[in-house]
Image: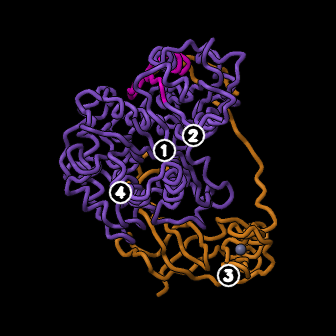
């Protein structure tokens, strides 16, 4: 941790910060989801027979009935744009000239938030069919970034 | 058990974009002292329990609840801090009185947003660390995607959302506590820069500093302390799935359920007929429209048109955010819900000054905890 010091821009205030580093465990449901992307190029969901819902990404429990989920389903690598946005701010709040094109892509009864690629901002529509573009297998490490983006199905 | 609970004291300080000369403790102290004076209670002698709402990352201090008691008069007394919106805090204070274990309880919320220098990163830290955060999207994208789906499902337009900004910032001109009052035209809002389309920058509330405190009392104590008790007739709160992958993107289902809970307690079966005015979420302009529909005032898709027609102005049939809302007084972080409740109490007491509504008896307060949450609360107050 840095020592507190007076803020040169606001002499009545003191500057301080805290480095926060954590380990995150994605768990049984999440780890299998990522491993199947890495090794097989497949997106996995889990199905709740009682609620007839397919969770994507896969989870080991149903958030509706709290039942344990044991039916693993390959849900394919296509979906449709449920909603999207063109984002004009960076992570730190600074302005960006070229917007990020971001969508929630419905897959099964869930889906994934990711970038859209190979498309112009003005061409994107709700309902548009899109497919996953994975990184080459050798570069995949079992993370959400193994997906480069979704792109429209030609 | 105490059957009825009233708000008997009210204090606030602010709201201002920056408060460089005072600490958050002094903001809290100022608001609390005003509330105790207003209620006519001695905090050290009369107030039996204290509640604060705060989020460590907003405060820049971990285990922030340890920093709360002194400036509220709560040292060596029953107190706790909850991590939620101010309206969740009001619900908690209400329940404490209802138990019958306490007759007088204080609730406090504050914002020192001007000291939070990396607020975008702090908000992004609330995204799922494995599934969403690695994409490094500014969290406003959640609001942009929600607004887009809401417009798609209901046929609401960007112009109708902009009408919320015009109305609320105009209302704020009559509120001395609101720093963002302005007389804007629709075109001024629509021509501003994009934030996360279809959401424009001018449709998002700017931050402000301030603090709000209230004193709650059982019926017996309330009747003794004041001739203007404001009764809490019902409170409800609810969360949708936090995950971006399984939430409802178009509708504020959590507000609908929170309202159902509050309406049941308050005996409200026709909100538009039985409620005179409302202070609701407008951290982003579209949220006011989506929220009014979730609260059952209007059917999905009606709120935009009615707002553009003036139905929700102070002179309209259902005045909404007469205070100026978050767009008018600023985004007060965790204190937001208490600021909305503050306006409803002032109106019901007849102490709202230049913006006082005529003949109001029942008011609704609703609040949302902000991106990326699906956390909302509702309270029904009456005089
Ligand atoms: Zn189930």
Nearer to us of marks 3 and 2 is 2
Few, some or many residues within 10 Å of mark 4 (<14, 14–19, 20+): many
Instruction: Report if the beta carbon of the residue with label 2 is closer than 8 angstroms to ligand 1.
Output: no
What's the distance in space between the residues labelled 1 and 3, CA to CA? 35 Å
Q: Colour of chain A?
A: orange
Few, some or many residues within 10 Å of mark 3 (<14, 14–19, 20+): few
Q: What label does residue B91 carry, if any?
A: 2
Residue A51 percent coordinates (x, y): 68, 78
What's the distance in space between the residues labelled 2 and 4, CA to CA? 24 Å
Among the chains, which one is purple? B
Residue holding disc 3: A52
Residue holding disc 4: B289
What's the distance in space between the residues labelled 1 and 4, CA to CA? 18 Å
| Label 2 element class | helix
Q: Is residue B376 left or right of residue B287?
A: right
Q: Which image quarter holds the C terminus of chain B? A: top left
Question: Which quadrant of the figure has residue B210?
Answer: top left
| Stretch of the chain drawn in magenta | B7-30
Q: Are the residues flagged by discs 1 and 3 in contact, CB closer than 8 Å?
A: no
| Label 3 element class | loop
Which chain's residue wears label 2?
Answer: B
Residue A91 percent coordinates (x, y): 52, 49
Q: Which residue is found at the position 37% from the left and 34% from the top?
A: B343
Q: Are the residues flagged by discs 4 and 3 in contact, CB closer than 8 Å?
A: no
Q: Are the residues flagged by discs 1 and 2 in contact, CB closer than 8 Å?
A: yes
What's the distance in space between the residues labelled 1 and 2, CA to CA? 8 Å
Q: Compared with residue B240, is residue B359 higher up or lower down, i.e. above or below?
A: above
Nearer to us of marks 1 and 3 is 1
Q: Looking at the picture, do discs 3 and 2 lie on one chain?
A: no
């Amino acid at each position: 941790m840095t020592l507190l010091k007076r803020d040169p821009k606001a002499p009545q205030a003191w500057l301080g910060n805290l480095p926060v580093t954590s380990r995150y465990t994605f768990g049984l449901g999440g780890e299998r989801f990522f491993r199947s992307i890495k090794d097989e190029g497949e997106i996995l969901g889990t199905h709740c027979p009682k609620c007839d819902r397919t969770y994507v990404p896969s989870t080991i429990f149903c958030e509706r009935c709290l039942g344990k989920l044991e039916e693993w389903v390959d849900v394919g690598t296509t979906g449709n744009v449920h909603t999207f946005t063109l984002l004009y701010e960076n992570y730190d709040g600074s302005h960006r000239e070229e917007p990020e094109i971001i969508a929630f892509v419905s897959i099964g009864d869930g889906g994934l938030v990711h970038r859209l690629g190979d498309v112009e901002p003005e061409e994107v529509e709700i309902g548009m069919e899109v497919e996953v573009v994975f990184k080459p297998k050798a570069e995949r490490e079992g993370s959400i970034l193994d997906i480069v983006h979704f792109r429209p199905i030609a | 058990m105490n059957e009825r609970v009233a708000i008997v004291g009210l204090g606030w300080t602010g709201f201002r974009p920056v408060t460089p000369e005072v600490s958050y403790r002094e903001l809290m102290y100022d608001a609390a002292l005003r509330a105790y004076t207003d209620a006519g209670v001695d905090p050290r002698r009369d107030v039996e329990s204290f509640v604060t709402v705060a989020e460590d990352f907003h405060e820049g201090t971990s285990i922030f609840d340890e920093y709360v008691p002194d400036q509220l008069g709560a040292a060596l007394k029953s107190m706790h801090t909850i991590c939620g919106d101010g309206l969740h805090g009001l619900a908690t204070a209400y329940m404490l009185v209802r138990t019958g274990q306490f007759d007088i309880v204080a609730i406090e919320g504050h914002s020192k947003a001007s000291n939070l220098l990396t607020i975008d990163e702090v908000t992004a830290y609330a995204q799922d660390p494995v599934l969403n955060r690695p994409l490094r999207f500014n969290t406003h994208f959640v609001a942009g995607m929600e607004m887009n789906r809401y417009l798609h499902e209901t046929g609401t337009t960007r112009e109708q959302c902009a009408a919320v900004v015009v109305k609320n910032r105009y209302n704020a001109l009559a509120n001395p506590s609101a720093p963002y009052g302005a007389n804007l035209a629709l075109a001024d809002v629509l021509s501003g820069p994009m934030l996360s389309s279809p959401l424009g920058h001018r449709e998002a509330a700017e931050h402000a500093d301030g603090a709000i405190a209230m004193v709650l009392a059982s019926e017996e104590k309330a009747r003794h302390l004041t001739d203007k008790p404001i009764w809490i007739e019902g409170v409800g709160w609810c969360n949708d799935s936090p995950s971006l992958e399984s939430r409802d993107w178009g509708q504020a289902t959590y507000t609908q359920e929170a309202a159902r809970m509050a309406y049941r307690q308050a005996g409200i079966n026709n909100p538009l007929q039985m409620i005179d005015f409302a202070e609701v979420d407008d951290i982003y302009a579209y949220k006011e429209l989506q929220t009014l529909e979730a609260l059952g005032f209007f059917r999905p898709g009606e709120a935009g048109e009615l707002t553009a027609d003036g139905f929700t102005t102070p002179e309209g049939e259902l005045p909404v955010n007469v205070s100026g809302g978050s767009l008018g007084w600023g985004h007060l972080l965790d204190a937001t819900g208490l600021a909305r409740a503050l306006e409803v109490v002032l109106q019901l007491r007849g102490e709202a000054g230049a913006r006082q509504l005529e003949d109001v008896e029942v008011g609704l307060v609703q609040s949302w905890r902000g991106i990326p949450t699906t956390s909302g609360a509702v309270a029904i107050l009456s005089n």
